[in-house]
Image: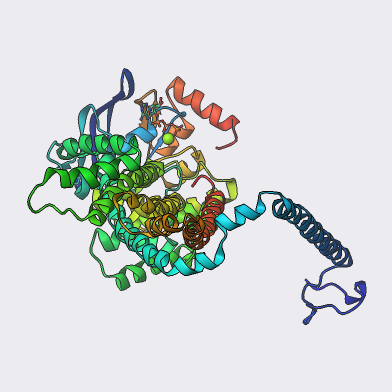
Amino acid sequence: MSQPVLEVKQVRKSYGSEVVLEDISFSVPVHTATVFIGSSGSGKSTLLRCINLLDQIDDGSIVLDGEDITAVDADVDKVRRKLGIVFQSFNLFPHMKVIDNITLAPMKVQGISKELARENAYKLLDRFGLHDKAENYPDRLSGGQQQRVAIIRSIAVAPRLLLLDEITSALDPVLVNEVLSTVRDLKIEGMTMVLATHEMGFAKQVADEVCFLHQGKILEWGTPAQILEAPQQAETKEFLKRVHEAGRL
Amino acid sequence: MGRPSESHFGAAPYDFGGKWVPSELEITRRAARKARNIRNSIIAVVSSIVVIGGLALIAVTSPGWKSLSDTFFAWAYGVEVLPKIILGFGTNVTLTLIASTCVAILGLSIALIRTSRSPALAPFRILATLYVDIFRGIPMLLVILLIGFGIPALRIQGLTNNVLVLGTIAVIITYTAYVAEVIRSGILTIHPSQRAAARSLGLSHFQSLRYVVLPQAFRRVTPPLLNDLVALIKDTGLVSILGVTDAVRAAQIASSRSFNYTPYVMAAIIFLLVTIPLTRFTDRTLRRSIERQNATGVA
Ligand SMILES: Nc1ncnc2c1ncn2[C@@H]1O[C@H](COP(=O)(O)OP(=O)(O)OP(=O)(O)O)[C@@H](O)[C@H]1O
Ligand SMILES: [Mg+2]
């Protein structure tokens, strides 16, 4: 068994006196997707932000490709170059055209020539059916298109690991589907991913492992079938019941 | 989708091979709108003529009009001194160009220092804050007097006594404090998520600033900065107090020679010729930037 892409070991995070993450441990093998589910405020976004080093953990460690990225002497910029993250709200750069949003990091971070960066970007846009939006500014795109551009932007730097934080929660159901099918394609191509989502149907389709986060702890984990169809813990059952009632299963 | 053309009467302007043609309803609506626009224009023109013409009539027929126009609007004398004032205005323009360039560079530097978080820059942050607080709180005239008369009084070798240079420095010092604050507020209005997105793509702190934060910040502060430019042009007139022969000073000399105030009016007109177009331009930029922000919504 090869070394996992990501190993999270006994991570703890608190804001002031409020403990947001407690004793979080899991690992993500290459080409797999780990999906975090849990109610609002359970700490999903915080976990992803900690992995991306946007927030500092209080205890434990996070290992990426065998390298402790939470060590004091870790090179934050280098770590982030290996990670792609897409946020809940699409953080495209509004002053740049779609194509420039995508080519910025490859050109400035990886030092790729403008021609090559544009060529690669167009290939990605083609593949996700956004070719004719390349020269538009983000505010001329629908929410779903914006979110797909955000995904393309983060994979344009060929990250080792992609972090997706509730990328569909700001979208209506039709747009949700176009974004989710983009993620499914990435999964098929072998992208390693960690996701936080409220879409249980989607979790079922892409996840290799589902973790149920409750009040900052991983209460239950396993295959999608185990967690979503035969949960053991009372809290998981309760959560899934509420999701079901809200019509998102 | 084309509709049967029987439903229209008259020439249908867009009917190329079954393309959309305005319906009867739309045509009557357009006619009504056009009639209303014409009526509104007529009302605007008539009421403007009545009000402005009335005011002018009152002014001209009032008993003081004769002496007023002799003192302020002696055009023959005004034209005679005009070349001197225009020459002086050249000084204002030069001063504005030099000062605005320096202010832009220094203001940006100070804004960047104040918004930085690097611990190594901590002393500079304190100094920058102090500087901004002090020079935003002092009337510019005082700064001009302090530097223009104070520095030569020191009698230090190698330091210039040129009042034009000293006046320019005083203007730069004051305006840098204002402009730094405008730029800083622009940087602060860019949502932290933009920086986070840039950083998580692997861009360094400096690259995030250069490619993501500053371009957006500048777009937001362009209108207030243009406002400051208009103010700067006017305020260059203040260095006349040091004896610099700018437009204001030239007008003052001409006026004191004849006890007539027309030269001042001429100087005012010359300033207006530059500032009014710039103000209009600023308004338009502001309106556009508001429209753009509304179109973008929260994003
Ligand atoms: N910067 C912060 N400062 C203080 N508390 C915070 C901060 N960020 C998050 N929290 C708190 O941490 C807890 C977990 O938040 P988090 O955003 O991780 O939840 P989440 O699981 O992503 O929820 P949602 O499904 O609504 O996105 C919440 O109680 C929140 O109030
Ligand atoms: Mg969240």
Q: Residue at 49%, 52% (x, y): give it.
A: A179
Q: Nearer the viewer, residue B298 or B111?
A: B111
How many numbered tags mark residues here? 0
In the image, residue B144 above or below residue A9? below
Work out which residue is located at the far front of the displayed protein and give it.
Answer: B258
Could you tell me if residue B204 is visible in this image?
no
Q: What is the x, y in percent for residue A15?
A: 32, 24
Q: Would residue A241 appear left or right of B210 to someone viewing this image?
A: right
- Say which of A159 and A96 sits in front: A96
| Residue beneath the point at 46% across and 58% down | B258
Describe the colour scheme in one phrase. Answer: rainbow
Give the answer, above or below, for where A249 lies relative to B48: above
Q: On the rendering, which quadrant does ligand 2 occupy?
A: top left
In the image, residue B73 lies at what x, y percent?
57, 59
Can residue A95 be seen from the camera position used here?
yes
Is B186 placed above or below B253 here? above
Which part of the image, by quadrant, shows the N terminus of chain B? bottom right
Percent across and percent down for residue B167 are 27, 51
> For residue A127, which quarter of the picture?
bottom left
- Farthest residue toward the top? A17
Left or right: B44 as drawn, with respect to A195? right
Observer-nearest of B85 and B169? B85
